[in-house]
Amino acid sequence: MNILAGLETFLYVISSVLLFPVVAGLTALTLWVIVYFGSFLREYLERRRGYYSSVERYKRMLDSEVSLSTVNGSLDINLERLLQDAELGLIKSLDRIRFVIRVGPALGLMGTLIPMGISLSSLAQGDMPKMAGSMVTAFTTVVVGLACSVAAYMVSLIKEKWVRADMREMEYLTELTLRGSKFKVQNAKLEEEDEIFEETQAI
């Protein structure tokens, strides 16, 4: 029986110690959501004006890759690798917001259960002010965690649509670039054949 009581005390101490990291994590999560929402709003306004930062960045990378591949050769392989890297970067950009969707409720639940244990302990000791403070912390943390998760989920729905649209545009630009480069190569070959033919005629 003493062993069980010791284990319970040990778990209670661990739970109490975790309260500060949980509250700090929820605070940091809330600040991050606010900052991320600001960047999301800026991107929304840019897209309303017709400026797509991811696509524009990919265009610059595409132009530089075409100039390098023209010298080194193997344009098809290099452009395919560039497209895959760009798409992977877009997908990774969603991982942070998905992290908030999953972690927010978990931290909120931990922030609720831990103070409730402290509150029950305070009730057993007759410390009503401490019990009331713990209950306020319990309800506040779960509300904040759920609010962060809901906000992140709403943003992720729109971000996923943007990412899919950007990926389609990148694939389209890559295909256009490949066709344009093949057309230039064919024209260069035709011009070379014409020059050879004219030289043979002159001889």
Image: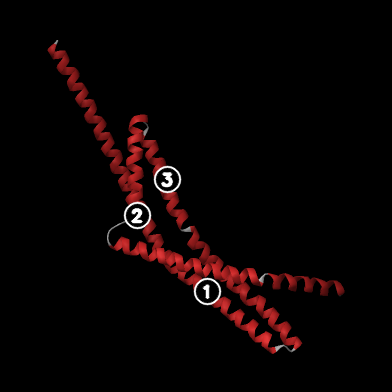
Q: Which image quadrant for residue 3? A: bottom right
Residue tagged by mark 2?
53
* Circle on res. 84: 3
Structural distance between the alpha carbons of marks 1 and 3 = 35 Å
Give the residue displayed 66% in from the left and 75% down from the top: 114
Relative to 7, say whether 125 is above or below: below
Q: Nearer the viewer, mark 2 or mark 1?
A: 2
Give the residue displayed 58% in from the left and 81% down from the top: 139
Of the residues under marks 1 and 3, which one precedes in the sequence? 3
Q: Amino acid at mark 3?
A: Gln
Of the residues under marks 3 and 2, which one precedes in the sequence? 2
Kindly give the residue lying farthest to the left in the view shown.
Answer: 202
Relative to 11, say whether 72 is above or below: above
Q: Amino acid at mark 1?
A: Leu
Q: Amino acid at mark 2?
A: Ser
User: Residue 107: x and y, percent?
Assistant: 59, 70
Q: Nearer the viewer, mark 3 or mark 2?
A: 2
- Position of 67 compared to 113: left or right? left
- Position of 42 compared to 17: left or right? left
Residue tagged by mark 1?
146
Structural distance between the alpha carbons of marks 3 and 2 = 18 Å
User: Residue 91: x and y, percent?
Assistant: 45, 54
User: Residue 122: x and y, percent?
Assistant: 72, 84
- Position of 102 compared to 173: left or right? right
Q: Classify mark 1: residues with Cα within 10 Å, few (<14), some (14-19) or many (20+).
A: many
User: Residue 67: x and y, percent?
Assistant: 32, 36
Of the residues under marks 2 and 1, which one precedes in the sequence? 2
Q: Classify mark 3: residues with Cα within 10 Å, few (<14), some (14-19) or many (20+).
A: some
